[in-house]
Amino acid sequence: MELDAWIILRQLIVRCRLGQSMKLLDSWGYMSRKQLQNLKRCRSKLALVSAVGQIAEENDIGLQQVMELELLYVQLFSKQKTWRAFKLTGPQNLMAEPINQERLRADLQNKLSLFFKSMVVVREIQRAFWIQISIQEKSSKAKLRRYTVHAVFYPLSAHIFLTFAKSSAQDHLLQVLHLALNYRNIEMVVLGGHCLESLSRIVSNEANMCGLQNPSLAMMSKHNIEAETDPRITDENKKDKERTMALTHQSFGNQPQPVLEELVFTLDTRFHGLITIPAMKESTDVFSTKVRFQSKNVLEAVKSLGIHGLAKTPLPYTLRMVPQLGRNSFRISERKKKLQE
C-alpha cells in the first residue's frame, strides 16, 4: 500500500468515532462482509487502524480507492465545509446519454490534465454527484503538496456547490466542470454556507413554498397568543401582536427555515450628517457601509425579530424573502437622483 494512501486512511479512521468509522467502511464497498464483521470486534481506534491497514494490504487498495473513502467522509461531515453556489446555464447535447459517475470521472480527469496534475473521484449519492479533485503542486521546497477541492452537482436544479479553491486554479476548475457536465456557462451565485441541504433547497426553490398564504394563519396566531396569556394580565397590545404573528407567518410560513449562518448587506450612501458637519455639503463621495447578521440559523433569528418586538413588521423585502431571492449577500444603493443632489 502506498505511503500517501496509508496516511490518508489512518487520518480518516482517527477523526471518526468507532461507529462512524464502521459506517464509512461499510458504504465504501471495498471490504467483504466477513472483514467488516472482524473489524466490529475492535474496541479502540488503535486496534481499528491496525486492522484496517492490514485488510487494505490484503485487498490491494490504492490511493484512488482511499480517496473515495475520503469523499464519503466529506459527505458524512459536509457541514464542516463552507460551500459556495454556482449556476450552470446553456445546457448542450440534450440527446446525450445521462451522466454516470464513471464517465464523469474520466471526462473530468482528461480535461483537468490539460492544466495540472490531479486525481479525481466521483460518487453518486442521493441524486447528487459528489466530486473530489486532488491537485498536486510544488511547494517552495520543491516537494509535491496536494490540496483538495470538493464539488456537489445537483442535476435537477442545474447547480453545483464548491468548497474553497485557490484563485490560480478556480477559473480552470469552473471551465472544466461546466464542460464535463454539458453546459455552456457557469456563473457564481451570491449564496454560501455550511448546510448543503439548505443551500440545495434554496436554489431548487423548494423553500419558496414556505411563504404561501394560509387563511388559517391569523386564527392560528390568535389561538397561540390566547394560550400563552395569563388571565390575570390585561394585554393592551393584543391586536398588534395578532397582526405581527399573522404577517410573520405569511412571510416565513410554519416550516423550519433553511439553515444559513450569515446575511450580509452592503449599503452605498452619501453623507447625511450635514447639520453636524456642513463642510461635507459639497462632497460627492459615496460611503459604503456593511451590516452582517450571523447566527447558527440566521433566518430563524430574523423571523423572531418581529415576534419579539425588536423590528417592525412586515420586515424589509431583503430580510423576509432571502430563500426566494436565492442569495445571502445584498448590495443596496440609494437612487441616483438622491446621490446626485
Image: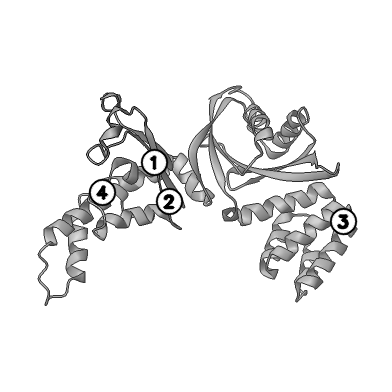
User: In the image, residue 234 lies at what x, y percent?
Assistant: 9, 71
- In the picture of the structure, the residue carrying the numbered disc 3 is 59
User: Closer to the camera, 164 or 157?
Assistant: 164
- Number of callouts in the render? 4
User: Closer to the camera, 328 or 59?
Assistant: 328
User: In the image, residue 181 lies at what x, y percent?
Assistant: 63, 30
Question: Secondary structure beneath disc 2?
Answer: loop
- N-term mark: 2 or 4: 4
Q: Residues within 10 Å of mark 3 (few under 14, many from 20)?
A: few
User: From this viewpoint, is residue 246 visible?
Assistant: yes
- In the picture of the structure, the residue carrying the numbered disc 4 is 250
Q: Are marks 1 and 2 in contact (CB under 8 Å)?
A: no
Question: Secondary structure beneath disc 3?
Answer: loop
Q: CA distance from mark 4 to mark 3?
A: 58 Å
- N-term mark: 3 or 1: 3
Q: Residue at x 56, y 36 (%)?
A: 155
Q: Residue at x 68, y 30 (%)?
A: 172
Q: Residues within 10 Å of mark 1 (few under 14, many from 20)?
A: few
- In the picture of the structure, the residue carrying the numbered disc 1 is 289
Question: Secondary structure beneath disc 4?
Answer: helix
Question: Secondary structure beneath disc 1?
Answer: strand
Q: Residue at x 80, y 35 (%)?
A: 117
- Mark 1 or 2, which is nearer the eye? 1
- In the picture of the structure, the residue carrying the numbered disc 2 is 258
